[in-house]
Amino acid sequence: MQNGIESILKKNPLIPVVTINEMSEIDTIADKLTSQGVNCIEITLRTPIAWDAIREFQQRYGSSFDVGVGTIVSVEDIEKAVEAQVDFIVSPGCSPGMVSALNGCGIPFLPGIVTPSEIITGLEAGWRFFKFFPANLYGGIDTLKAYGQLFSEAKFCPTGGITNDNKESFLALDNVVSVGGSWMTK
């Protein structure tokens, strides 16, 4: 299901969401994460060097990290992720055109949702795991509790407003497998 995203999420309850602005940051970021016992990273596509940074991070740390790409917003992004041979893909949302590309890409993926309609669409596509983003703007824990009653088969990785102080409250929910955030590299 979803090309094996469940095993990535269960193995990594904390998924650092990282934007790399300069290649010189890579070693510092890897060191910070390793020192916290974190061996996973979602590198966002928010900078012009993102794809180069992903390849460089993989080359240096791919044997000890699950290296994913975030902010996937198009079929073209999915194709680039396949080309880069990332370990997982994360999107903030999903278009109808991305559904078959994600299902067929062979890489574990986590599509973003906010609304019940988006969850239903994902469930119809055969998906069970979703990024709930941005959690802080859409009700956070209360929304996830409600979704747990409505969609018992759906599991979430909330991101957006997750901090070191509130991560355990999210992880305590039955329908939360992991959490994502940027606090781990600050």
Image (cartoon, rainbow, N blue to C red):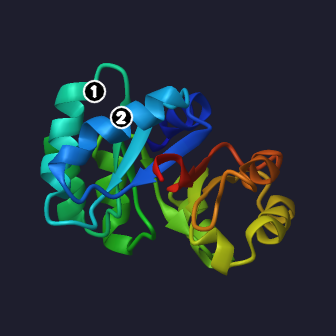
Where residue 123 appears, x then y in whole percent?
Answer: 60, 59
Q: Which mark is residue 61?
A: 1
What residue is shown with label 2?
30
Where residue 121 appears, x then y in whole percent?
Answer: 55, 69
Q: Observer-nearest residue: 97 or 6?
A: 6
Residue for point 56% across, 38% down? 9
Answer whether labels 2 and 1 touch (C-beta < 8 Å). yes
Where residue 106 appears, x then y in whole percent?
Answer: 31, 39
Occupied quadrant, residue 68: top left
| Residue 90 visible in image | yes
Where residue 35 appears, x then y in whole percent?
Answer: 50, 28
| Amino acid on which disc 2 is placed | Ala
In the displayed structure, would residue 56 be above or below residue 156? above
- Please, what secondary structure does the residue beneath circle 2 have? helix
Occupied quadrant, residue 59: top left
| Residue 3 visible in image | no
In the displayed structure, would residue 15 be above or below residue 35? below
